[in-house]
C-alpha cells in the first residue's frame, strides 16, 4: 500500500520518499474512536485521546470535511496522547494533533 501500487494518496506521495525493505513486526490494534491504541513491534506506539478545552477541560469533538481530500473525506480530530516512532527514524508526536476516519483506496 505505501509503495503506491494500490493507488490512493500513496500513489502520489511515493514520489516524495523512499521505502526501506519491510521487516516483520507484530501489529496490535485496538480501534475505539478516541480511545484507539496501536503498536507495531517496538517501532511504533500510538494512543489517541479526545481533545480538551484548555480553559474548562471539557471534551470537544471537532471534525473536518474534505470533499476532495486525498487521505480521507471526513475525519474526527483527536489528540495523540502517545505517538512515537523508533528505529531508522526517531519521531515523537505525542500530545499533538491526530485524526481518524474511514477511507477507501481503490486501484
Image: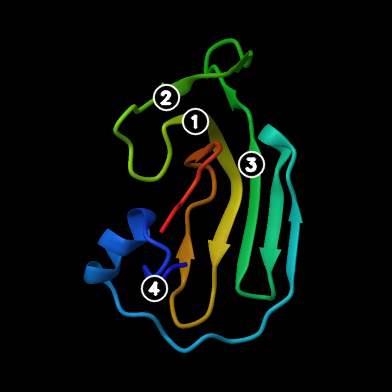
Left or right: residue 53 compared with residue 13: right
Q: Earlier in the sequence, mark 4 or mark 1?
A: 4
- Separation of marks 3 and 1 at Cα, in angstroms: 14 Å
Residue at image mark 2: 64
Q: Residue at x 57, y 19 (%)?
A: 61
- The reply to whether callout 2 and callout 1 are in contact (CB within 8 Å) is yes
Could you tell which of marks 3 and 2 lies nearer the N-terminus? 3
Give residue 3's mark. 4
Count neighbours of disc 2 (C-alpha within 10 A) and say few if under 14, some if 14 to 19, many if 20 or more. some
Secondary structure of the residue carrying tag 1 is strand
Question: Residue at point 43% right, 68% down?
Answer: 2
Distance Cα–Cα, label 2 vs label 1: 5 Å
Which residue is situated farthest in the front direction here?
A: 107
Q: Which residue is mark 3?
A: 48
Question: Whole-Å distance between the Cαs marked 3 and 2?
Answer: 17 Å
- Tell which tag, 4 or 1, sits nearer the viewer: 4
As rendered, which of 60 and 32 lies closer to the eye? 32
Q: Which residue is mark 1?
A: 75
Residue situated in front as seen by the camera: 40 or 95: 40
- In terms of sequence position, does the residue under pointer 3 or pointer 1 come before the other? 3
Residue sitting at x 36%, y 68%: 4
Mark linked to residue 88: none
The CA span between labels 4 and 1 is: 24 Å
* SS category of the residue bearing label 3: strand
Amino acid at each position: 500500500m505505501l509503495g503506491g501500487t494500490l493507488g490512493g494518496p500513496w500513489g502520489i506521495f511515493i514520489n516524495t520518499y523512499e521505502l526501506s525493505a519491510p521487516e516483520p513486526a507484530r501489529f496490535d490494534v485496538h480501534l475505539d474512536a478516541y480511545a484507539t491504541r496501536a503498536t507495531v513491534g517496538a517501532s511504533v506506539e500510538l494512543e489517541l485521546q479526545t481533545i480538551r478545552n484548555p480553559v474548562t477541560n471539557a471534551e470537544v469533538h471537532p471534525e473536518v470535511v474534505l470533499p476532495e481530500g486525498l487521505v480521507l473525506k471526513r475525519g474526527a480530530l483527536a489528540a495523540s496522547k502517545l505517538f512515537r516512532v523508533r528505529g531508522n527514524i526517531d519521531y515523537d508526536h505525542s500530545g499533538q494533533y491526530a485524526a481518524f476516519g474511514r477511507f477507501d483506496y481503490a486501484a
